[in-house]
Image (tube, grey):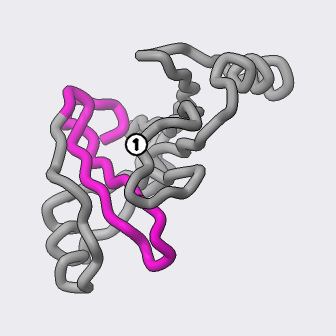
Amino acid sequence: MAKATGIGGVFFRANDITATAQWYERCLGLNVSTWEGGAFSQFNWREADNPEAKGYTIWSPFNQSTKYFDPGGADFMINFRVDDLDAVLEHLRAQNVEIVGDIQTEPYGRFAWIIDLDGRKVELWEPADDDPAK
């Protein structure tokens, strides 16, 4: 069965992205970068079963007004890494899971979104072949 292989990211709404980023830098030592009006920190790691395989998890606050979490409406969204997005979506369709929008392809991978049992939007990410997270 196709399945999630790990957490690709944790995204959440923040009242003030800059203040939030500075707080996490000061209090927890995160190395926060900015992008397109947002912020993120990247946690690099290696696969336990294959130490040569690299990966990363993203932490990122979003503006309170973001529509990125819609239609779920929650103040956060989890991104799950998957190794075969098409197979995962096929499995989810068979489980009558609501799929939101179309697959999006970016230089760092392919993305799809679903709605979980409690109405939260969940992001699925298949890293690109040349992305270190694959």
Instruction: Judge whether residue 50 is colored magenta.
Output: no
Percent across and percent down for residue 7 are: 49, 52
Give coordinates of residue 2: x percent, y percent.
25, 71
Image point (37%, 53%), residue name: 123
Say which amino acid is labelled 1: Tyr
SS of the residue at dot 1?
A: loop
Q: Looking at the image, is 71 positioned above or below residue 58?
A: below
Q: Quadrant of residue 16?
A: top right
> Is 85 drawn above or below residue 67 in the view shown?
below
Q: Which residues are magenta?
A: 106-134
The residue at which mark 1 appears reads as 68
- Residue at 30% in and 41% down: 134
**Quarter of the figure with the N terminus:** bottom left
Q: Identify the residue shown where x is 37% and y is 68%.
A: 115
Residue shown at the point (44%, 49%) measured from the top left: 69
Residue 28, picture quadrant: top right
Q: Where in the figure is residue 98, as x and y percent of width and height?
A: 27, 72
**Please, is residue 70 above or below residue 31 in the view?**
below
In the image: residue 14, left or right of residue 4: right
Asked if the magenta segment contains residue 121, the reply would be yes
Q: Outermost residue, bottom direction?
A: 95
Is residue 21 left or right of 104 when viewed as pictured? right
Q: Residue 87 location, x and y as percent?
A: 16, 67
Closer-to-camera residue (44/51): 44
10 Å crowding of disc 1: few (<14), some (14-19), many (20+): some
